[in-house]
Amino acid sequence: MTGQLRDSDKTQLEQWIGQGQKQFTLLYSATSDGCTSQKFHEKCDYQGATVTLVYNEVGSVFGGYTSASWAGNVNSYTRDDKAFLFQLKVSNKDTFRKFPVSNSTYSIYSHSSNGPVFGGNTGYDMNLFSGTIASSGGLFQLNGGFAFGINYTMSGVSSWNDIHNGNLNIKELEVYSVAVKPPEATHQEWRKVPEWSKTLVKELMQGVQSIKPRNSLIQDYRIALIGPVGSGKSSFCNTINSVFKGRITQRALCGDGRQSVTKSVHVNKRL
């Protein structure tokens, strides 16, 4: 089930919510699940942070965000300092406004008979509906109420009419869960590594053997073996030491820590 939330709306909501990109998952849709308080709580209770969006028939889009969970069986208020109301469109024109909570004691109200309710005490700032609302001509007429500026700071507007045009006939009501978006896996290698084969081994050996600097330029080689723990670096040194026993007087020193990481390097000396 996919919703109507646009990518541009997601970006704006992410900025308002803060702390990076979010993953929005549609939990509830009035057109798909029915505009009933029972279905709302069945789909949305105890889902963590959510964003509620309302789309009315004259092209206005508004809603609310809470980082707290809805809980219809509690029938009480939930404090949420991060809650806010917002508008995204007015008369089909993008209009981005955030209305932060001013009295977080009454941020949201959960009741089994109600849909999403923001605010309370002396008035519900945004009480969308209660009970069951039947669809008529593809629209749902909200039966809740909107009190202006009781528990949320409504800067930039003078009344709820500036947000929903005084029109409570809605085409859709959606609730999305909001979670931290997991990082996308990259399928591109950070560097190209040739496929290991006998031919490649032979080429590497020939490349090493072909290095013959003048004695006047260099007297010996210093080779750094780099690889993960347990790849056989120390074993290789000990094998070479055994082969040249009598000529090499000191073996490569390896650390004895938990990660078995080489702590010091000593140049091999010839007799």
Image: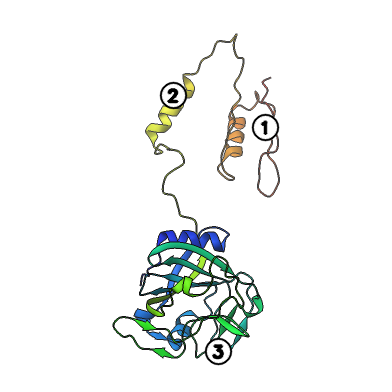
Q: Is residue 53 visible?
A: no
- Eyeballing the image, is 186 above or below 44? above
Residue extending furthest front? 158
Q: Residue furthest top?
A: 216
Q: Would you place residue 56 above or below residue 224 in this image?
A: below
**Residue that label 3 marks:** 73
Decide which of 108, 187 is in the foreground and name it: 108
Number of the label disc, if any, that sits on residue 206: 2
Quarter holding residue 58 = bottom left
Question: In which quarter of the view is residue 49 placed?
Answer: bottom right
Q: Point out residue 40 in the picture as x, y percentages from the top left corner.
A: 45, 83
- In space, the residues marked 1 and 3 are separated at their CA atoms by 72 Å
Q: Are marks 2 and 3 in contact (CB under 8 Å)?
A: no
**Mark 2 to mark 3: distance in Å?**
76 Å
Which of the two discs, 1 and 3, labels the residue nearer the N terminus?
3
Q: Amino acid at mark 1?
A: Arg
Left or right: 16 with respect to 30?
right
Q: Pointer 1: residues within 10 angstroms few (<14), some, or many (20+)? A: some
Tell which of 161 and 79 is nearer to you. Answer: 161
Graded by Cα atoms within 10 Å as few (under 14), some (14 to 19) or many (20 or more), the crowding at tag 3 reads: few
Q: Nearer the viewer, residue 49 or 165?
A: 165
- Of helix, strand and loop, which one carries label 2? helix
Residue 38 numbered mark, or none = none
Protein image colouring: rainbow
Q: Amino acid at mark 3?
A: Asn
- Whole-Å distance between the Cαs marked 1 and 2? 26 Å
Specify the quadrant that holds the N terminus.
bottom left
Relative to 6, does residue 202 appear above or below in the rendering? above
Q: Position of residue 192 (x, y in %)?
A: 42, 38
Q: Quadrant of the C terminus?
A: top right
SS under mark 3: loop
